[in-house]
Image (cartoon, rainbow, N blue to C red):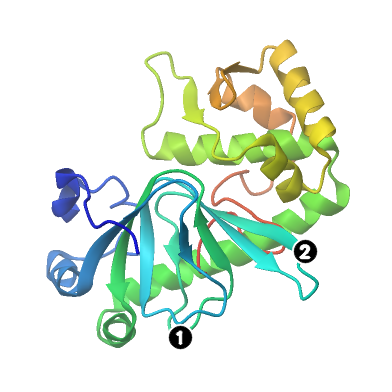
Amino acid sequence: MAATFVPKLLDDCGSCPIRQRAVCARCEPDELQHLEQIKYYRSFEAGQTVIWSGDRMDFVASVVTGVATLTQTMEDGRRQMVGLLLPSDFVGRPGRGSASYDVTAATDMVMCCFRRKPFEDLLLSTPHVAQRLLEMTLDELDAAREWLLLLGRKTALERIASLLVIIARRRAALGSTSAGGAVVFDLPLTREQMADYLGLTLETVSRKMTDLRQKGMITIAGNRRVTITDLDALAAVTGDDSDGPAVGQPVPGPMRRYAKGGA
């Protein structure tokens, strides 16, 4: 089980970095007080399993900091990453007592957890929480449809650009930009994980990342530190219709999500 230490700044919901995007985003002060009574924090180290598929899940949660992967295992042992969870994403499904996917911390992470049964009861008495959860669920459905397009029609370069833009826009929404407006983040996936996630080979991922770097659209420090100096230019590479939904509202996963939630 994970350690329970969390940064002190998270003690106050008002200063929480995901306050405006998480399941509590629409809550009034009195509604936040109800959530406070059933919440607790859990922290996980990179590589640590949050929960295994099929295990009893007595909590639901919002990712506060860090990134987690969702993975499904087939009967013959083959595994497929089916989604990412980024800050503000919702983990778990009210009304379901077991996990549908393996949830693993890709980076060090902190989750704001709610005891599942009290949270289910709270949905009936707190319309703002129920409304926000519905919005997040519908966003996830839209994202899954967008991901079908990505896997079925996009080129390798468009897939990689899409993933980078999605993560960058989520980071930017949480204030992770430099003074010059560039978006800087640590890529939460290894090249192997990116290949698995995007339906590509490792060699293709490495080659296309190099192409983007040589075109000046991204810089990479070490293996993970990515800087996107012109997000609009990179978004143009994704192949998305500029009149359609913006890339990266939530974070997608094959047949799963643009990171809007549930295990």
Question: Residue 198 location, x and y as percent?
Answer: 75, 46
**Which amino acid does the dot numbered 1 rest on?**
Gly
Question: Residue 169 location, x and y as percent?
Answer: 51, 37
Please count the marks in the image: 2
Which image quarter is the N terminus in?
Answer: bottom left
Q: How crowded is mark 2: few (under 14 residues within 10 Å), some or many (20 or more)?
A: few
Answer left or right for 247 relative to 241: left
**Which amino acid does the dot numbered 2 rest on?**
Arg
Find the distance from the CA under tag 1 to the CA under tag 2. 25 Å
**Residue at (46, 54) in percent of width and height:** 48
Is 98 in front, or is 90?
A: 98
Residue 239 visible within the image: no
Q: From this view, report whether residue 132 is shown above or below residue 124.
A: above
Q: Determine whether the residue tagged by mark 1 lies in a helix, strand or loop.
A: loop
Q: Determine whether the residue tagged by mark 2 lies in a helix, strand or loop.
A: loop
Q: Write down the residue under mark 2.
A: 78
Q: Which numbered disc covers residue 97?
A: 1
Question: Residue 45 location, x and y as percent?
Answer: 40, 48
Q: From this view, report whether residue 93 is shown above or below residue 151.
A: below
